[in-house]
Amino acid sequence: MKKHSNKSLTLFLTLMMMLTAFVTPPVNGHSSTRTDIPTWYQGDSWTYEGTVWGEGTNWSIDATIQDLKNLVTGIVTVTENGEEYECYQVEITGTIKGNFTWDILSGEIDGVIEGTSYYRISDLAQVKTHIHSYGEVDMPLPLDYEYNSTNTFNPPLENFDFPIKVGEQWEISSQVTTESHFYLEGLYDETSSNTSWVNKTLECTKKQTVKTPAGSFNSFLITNPNDEADDSLFYSPKAGNIVKGEVYYSDENNSFEAHINLKTYSRKTQPLTITETLFPLEFIQGEEVKISGKITNSETGEPIKNTVISIEIPATEETYHTTTDDNGNYEKTITPHVIQDHTPSTIEIGSDGVIVKCTKGSLTGYRVKTLVSIDHNTPPKKPMYINGVTKGYANETYSYSTSTYDLNYDQLYYLFDWGDGSNGSWV
């Protein structure tokens, strides 16, 4: 009984954190079936509401989660398992209210949820999470409860394989070490430690419109195709967040489900605005990649001139430097090392964020874009049709157009064969 109750509370709080952990800003310019990694900044926040239900051998819970806020408070260096990671620090606050049963006792739970989580900047992999919850359970006399849990992930848990693409599957695997303590006045006081593995397949199956208290969103649906549980996360570029999540869990002793919806969110502007373009977005070993963009003062719009910037790829431990020109533009061509990560996929070797950083006096800014390492390049799809007139007159000018897409998101060039032995030029 003690084991099941402690495990269930740990599971609930951990799953709530996973549901609220991933955010992405709107993505422009590339296929609507793809979305890239976010760039978070201090002051960004996302607030959720949700419900949780569970039951086991001698326990049950039916509660609501209110105002579960995730606030980015800064960037810190976290050391775990002998490795250093540059991470976003995210503070969590919220409340839990509902009904709770323990053996023959039942009552109402009224508590606070607090915590801190750390996510690697380059890929939003979860490095470490601490959860603290406390309050009262009325059974019918009020009993104090307190719960502390620290989860560390080795390697950091890459729940999402950026860039997210419709139709892609990826594997996630991480060893999770949990140190926890649960206290229920007069009934329970236990410290536990355990290690387990997270191993599962995830898939982005489609785009779907969902409604939440924050509005209606066109979202990427993430599921676990090899699990009987109907887990789902709805990831919206427009909202810059996961806008809806459903998680289910069961074993021989416990059943559990949690639902969460986006209530409000707020995004802050960095002092320096940095744009970043990678060409190509996906590269084969030995291929050159051009990194370019522009840096401006976010308040005035003025370009940041003749300033040294750094370009980092943490997964391969590569760092480059270049300088902006008189218009604030920068450009650097590199031959990156092959990138390997812990989210195996059939369509890539690995991926990681390319982080561009700039400091000008007291002003700072940074930007993250994902670079993907592949083992072969694929040709673009054949255009399906040509738009334009089928009959015309001599010496008249007519316009024609067509379109297609490239699986590697390379730049496309077109050439028209007019069928009379003549060709147009490459455009």
Image (tube, rainbow, N blue to C red):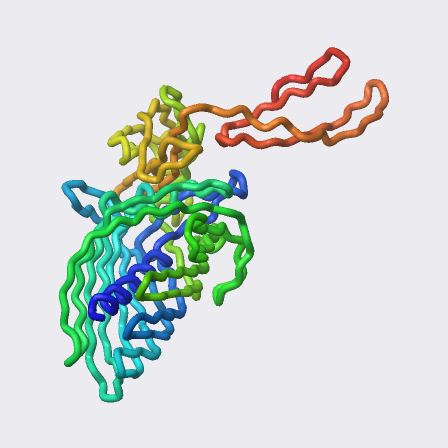
Q: Nearer the viewer, residue 16 or 267?
A: 16
Instruction: Pick out the residue farthest to the front.
Output: 252
Q: Work out whether 289 lies above or below 109.
A: above
* Residue at the image point whose x is 20% and y is 58% from the top: 150
* Residue at the image point whose x is 53% and y is 63% from the top: 211
Instruction: Pick out the residue farthest to the bottom.
Output: 141
* Residue at the image point whose x is 74% and y is 18% from the top: 418
* Residue at the image point whose x is 81% and y is 27% from the top: 390
Q: Nearer the viewer, residue 212 or 144?
A: 144
Residue 130 at what x, y percent from top left? 22, 59
Instruction: Pick out the residue farthest to the top.
Output: 421
Task: Please state the total of marks drawn on the protein image.
Answer: 0
Q: Work out whether 361 lies above or below 346.
A: below
Please give left or right for residue 2 compared with residue 273 in the image: left
Please give left or right for residue 95 compared with residue 409 in the image: left
Residue 10 at what x, y percent from top left? 26, 63
Q: Work out whether 294 lies above or below 425.
A: below
Residue 44 at what x, y percent from top left? 35, 56
Please give left or right for residue 216 compared with residue 289 in the image: right
Q: Nearer the viewer, residue 300 or 345?
A: 345
Residue 189 at what x, y percent from top left? 14, 72
The image quadrant of residue 154 is: top left
Quarter of the image where the C terminus is located: top right
Is residue 290 in sight in this rendering? yes
The image quadrant of residue 368 is: top left
Is residue 364 in sight in this rendering? no
Quarter of the image where the N terminus is located: bottom left
